[in-house]
Image: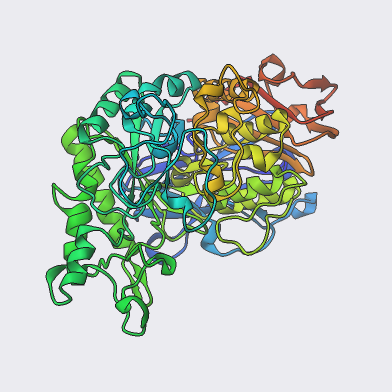
Amino acid sequence: MDLLTPHHDGSPLYVSAQHPRPGQTVQVRVRVPHAAGVSAVHVRVVPDGEQEFVAAREVARDEREAWWQAEVRCHNPVTGYRFLLSGDEQAGAPAYRWLNGTGVHPRDVPDAADFRIVTFPAPPAWAPGSVVYQVFPDRFARHPEVEPVGDPGGPRTDLPGWAVPAAWDDPVDIHRDTGPRQVFGGTLEGIREHLDHLVDLGATVLYLTPFFPARSNHRYDASTFDEVDPVLGDAAALVRLQEEAHQRGLRVMGDVTTNHTGDSHEWFRAAVADLEGEHAGWYVRDPEQEADDGWVSWLGVGSLPKLDYTNPAVGAAVYGTPQSVIRRWLGPGKGLDAWRVDVANMTGRFKDVDVAHDVARGVRRAVDEVAAATGEEHLLIAEHTHDHSSDALGDGWHGVMNYSGFTRPAWTWLRHAGFSPKFLGSPLRVPRADARLVAETMREFAAIVPWRTVAHSLTLLGSHDTSRVRTLVGDDPVQGEVAAALLLTMPGIPMVTYGDEVGMPGDFGEAGRRPMPWSARDTDPSRWDEATYAAYRALVGVRREHPALHSGGMRWAHAEGDCMVFLREAEGETALVHLARQAHEPVRLPLSSLPGLASGSAVIGPEPLVAGDAVVLDASRPLVRVWLWQPPVPEWAT
């Protein structure tokens, strides 16, 4: 994990076509420092399941490194490949090495971490440059029409019977039974009235957790997919929100549960009412399960019965027809421009039944067909909390919420020594890890899917389901800036959860779903941290402005202890990112491996020190440094 080892990733600098057609020939390149002692390069591919070797040729060389290139034909929808590097043993170089997504290996390796090129239809062109802002509608903002007369901010008086009304500044109920029923009364109109906050922050996508009618504040237990919850507004309010978002350069992402509905859903009520009727076959029943009449539910939560996709009628209702859930809300004037799919990893799976990929492809087909009809491009993101290698090749979901490859390892490096959270159902607390372990974890998870999936997955430090960033890292705003910098300089589509940008605290689950403290902006720095907001705003701006940060590749330069250094590389621009979670000894990088660095400039933090033949990166405290420059352009051989 240094700058003197051969490197390849799937970014445009290394792969000539990001969205090739079936059968198209693609150029793949590998960067080989002379210090690696490589004298020949071959590319191993496996068309139709049988390995084949393609000779690479040297296409550029200077005093530091050589670039090798091979032509690879995309014969199958997924083309896996890795590089075979050979050197002169008599000169002391290894004769046999493989380069795959996890690095260089002096031994044979399985195909699991091979690089991959896919020929599935391309994701939206707007997605890589996006910054997503997640809103929990009940907790973001009200609008004046729902405020109690004479008691602004007080408990709403127009809520359904299941709800426990709360004033906007009330503490959050963290009890498992009553917490989901506590309603603060945010609305779609309230969100619309605060869109300028998203624009000022630099966000480009508003992500709404579910807006369907339900019997909880989180609304993942929908009672219908045909309406907007009246507590939030109506379908017209959703369209107004979308229209004004578009006027401000924002898109809107919705959230849907393909795995289950609520037990008050019209489909499930019909199923229970007539066990021989049409809808009875829409839900999974287990004859071995005695409880709840055999109805299977999400993780045993009886209020969330599981849909049965072996019944074609379910697929038709969810994504297959013009009025299906996925299609009816998607497109201009419909309300949404993208979907995030809840519990995608469980959808269509139970015991010996696994139609998850069929469902994913069906949803993707619906999204693509809507896009073809509207002329707009729509993004499709799946919730997935662990290894997503078999579910995210690109024929279904464009990407995932990258909890496994980003959030979890980031937590192990960022978490405050005095706070050890649990992570999404884990029985153990999150450990505090060395930067090398974190980098290895991130690299390994990035290697299990195509680069295109990495680039179109949501990176996140937290969500409405997790601890807040401020609680994770502690009260030092600079630690929060380090966390934000990691989020906003890594590959993927960064997602900020409402309130994180102002230092909102909160532990797991309900404790993190506090109302947005709008009234505290100018009155209470303990609830609205302007320094943290300024850091997020600056980092978002830098990311959006520089192609290296939003679309470049990823090359680790150093990862030890309290220090991370990596490069984001695009054609014509390189960014060096140096993050320190606390003071560390100076790190020296060879200047010869960073051509052009001295001509760059610091966009965040101090400039690095150039001392002789080295770049010296030091930190006497937590620190963020982002340095950008234009590297020399290789003279490619024809």
Q: Is residue 14 visible?
A: yes
- Which residue of the protein is positioned furthest toward the front in this rendering? 150
Would you place residue 506 above or below residue 295 in this image? above
Q: State whether residue 118 is above or below residue 579.
A: below
Say how the picture is coloured. rainbow
Give the x, y percent position of residue 393: 41, 53
Give the x, y percent position of residue 484: 61, 32
Q: Where residue 453 sits: x, y (%)?
A: 44, 46
Residue displayed at 41% across by 19% down: 196
Front residue of 52/239: it is 239
Q: Height in image: 510 above or below 387? A: above
The reply, left or right, for residue 517 in relation to residue 209 is right
- Quarter of image, res 487: top right
Relative to 264, is 551 on the left or the right?
right
Residue 184 lies in what quarter of the image? top left
Looking at the image, can residue 570 be seen?
no
Residue at 35% over, 42% down: 20
Identify the residue shown where x is 55% and y is 43%.
512
